[in-house]
Image: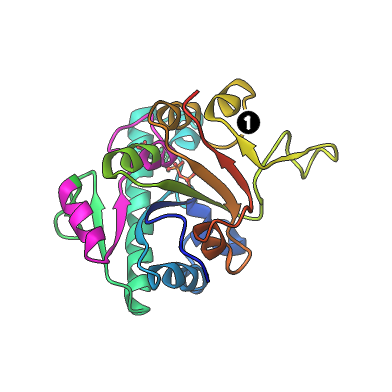
């Protein structure tokens, strides 16, 4: 086996990745399968920070559509990411992977507050750091959190794990037979073509800070390791223009 392509990575998981086929709630056996994959790259000495969404429990926009105040609904979404982060921590620790959860919304009984320098120290010591609570601000997403934390901690790449989609397509491959998969894109392509990769705030933050992104299907066993080793699976988005 060659050398890993990346040393410090941000792994972005959607909340749905923790739910399995139900698409809702938290399913520990499903998390366990995913954790095995994370364990494989942890063994290689890769520094791993994880950001997990909350869509399996609550999305702010859903609450807003039902008449709630958007900011209030978004705070609920941020709390959902904390539940997911704790579930992920539990399974990782059961599998023998040392972890720390840091939240951007202070919650001292359950997790450390987010402290950038401390997070980097944990990574250097081989602990997987899970960033919970999103950015701590309404109107943002956990994709934006991934871009923000990647810039802050100097991550080499954001690994954008998708459920049953193997990259970025010109259109939804499930609906359009003519959809073509891109292997390489720039962040500007993503923004100007309106491609469904991340929200535009997350894309522009990644573009301005030149943070590469690899979008790949995490439902294929071994894919996280393949991306780490530099196999060209999925779609790579890079370049600051
Ligand atoms: N959220 C927020 N600010 C953030 C991150 C998340 O308000 O910085 C809220 C927002 O309501 C969002 C929810 O948390 O809908 C869950 O996050 P996200 O939708 O990114 O989760 P995913 O789609 O990845 O499961």
At x 33%, y 33%, the residue is: 72
Q: Total of numbered circles in the picture? A: 1
At x 26%, y 59%, the residue is: 123
At x 32%, y 74%, the residue is: 93
Horizontal side of 21 relative to 96 (left or right) equals right
Ligand 1 is found in the corner quadrant, namely top left
Image quadrant where residue 128 sits:
bottom left
Q: Nearer the viewer, residue 54 or 33?
A: 33
Q: Nearer the viewer, residue 225 or 145?
A: 225
Q: Secondary structure at mark 1?
A: loop
Q: Label 1 belongs to which residue?
A: 195
Horizontal side of 113 relative to 18 (left or right) equals left
Label 1 CB sits under 8 Å from any ligand 1 atom: no
Q: Nearer the viewer, residue 102 or 39?
A: 39
Point out residue 49 in the picture as x, y percentages from the top left corner. Answer: 34, 55
Up/down of 170 relative to 222, above or below: above
Horizontal side of 124 relative to 222 (left or right) equals left
Outermost residue toward the front? 2
Q: Is residue 96 visible?
A: yes
Point out residue 130 in the picture as x, y percentages from the top left corner. Answer: 31, 56
Image quadrant where residue 97 sits:
bottom left
Point out residue 99 in the picture as x, y percentages from the top left corner. Answer: 27, 66
Up/down of 174 relative to 3, above or below: above
Which stretch did the figure color magenta? 117-146
Point out residue 187 in the picture as x, y percentages from the top left corner. Answer: 53, 29
Q: Is residue 95 magenta?
A: no
Horizontal side of 232 relative to 176 (left or right) equals left
Outermost residue toward the top? 192
Q: Nearer the viewer, residue 54 or 164?
A: 164
């Amino acid at each position: 086996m060659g050398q890993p392509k990346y040393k410090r990575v941000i792994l972005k998981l959607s909340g749905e990745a923790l739910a399995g086929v139900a698409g809702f709630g938290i399913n520990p056996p499903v998390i366990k399968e995913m954790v095995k994959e994370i364990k494989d790259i942890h063994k290689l000495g890769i520094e791993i920070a994880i950001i997990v969404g909350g869509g399996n429990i609550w999305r702010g926009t859903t609450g807003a559509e039902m008449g709630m105040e958007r900011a209030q609904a978004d705070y609920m979404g941020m709390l959902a990411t904390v539940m997911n982060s704790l579930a992920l921590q539990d399974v990782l620790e059961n599998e023998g992977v040392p972890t720390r959860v840091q939240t951007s919304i202070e919650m001292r009984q359950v997790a450390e507050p987010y402290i950038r320098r401390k997070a980097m120290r944990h990574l250097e010591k081989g602990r997987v750091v899970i960033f919970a609570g999103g950015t701590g601000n309404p109107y943002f997403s956990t994709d934006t959190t991934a871009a923000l934390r990647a810039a802050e901690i100097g991550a080499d790449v954001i690994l954008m794990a998708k459920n049953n989609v193997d990259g970025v397509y010109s259109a939804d491959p499930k609906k359009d037979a003519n959809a073509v998969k891109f292997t390489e894109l720039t962040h500007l392509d993503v923004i100007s073509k309106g491609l469904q990769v991340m929200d535009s705030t997350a894309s522009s933050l990644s573009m301005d800070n030149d943070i590469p992104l690899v979008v790949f299907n995490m439902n294929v066993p071994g894919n996280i390791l393949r991306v780490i080793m530099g196999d060209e699976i999925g779609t790579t988005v890079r370049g600051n223009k």
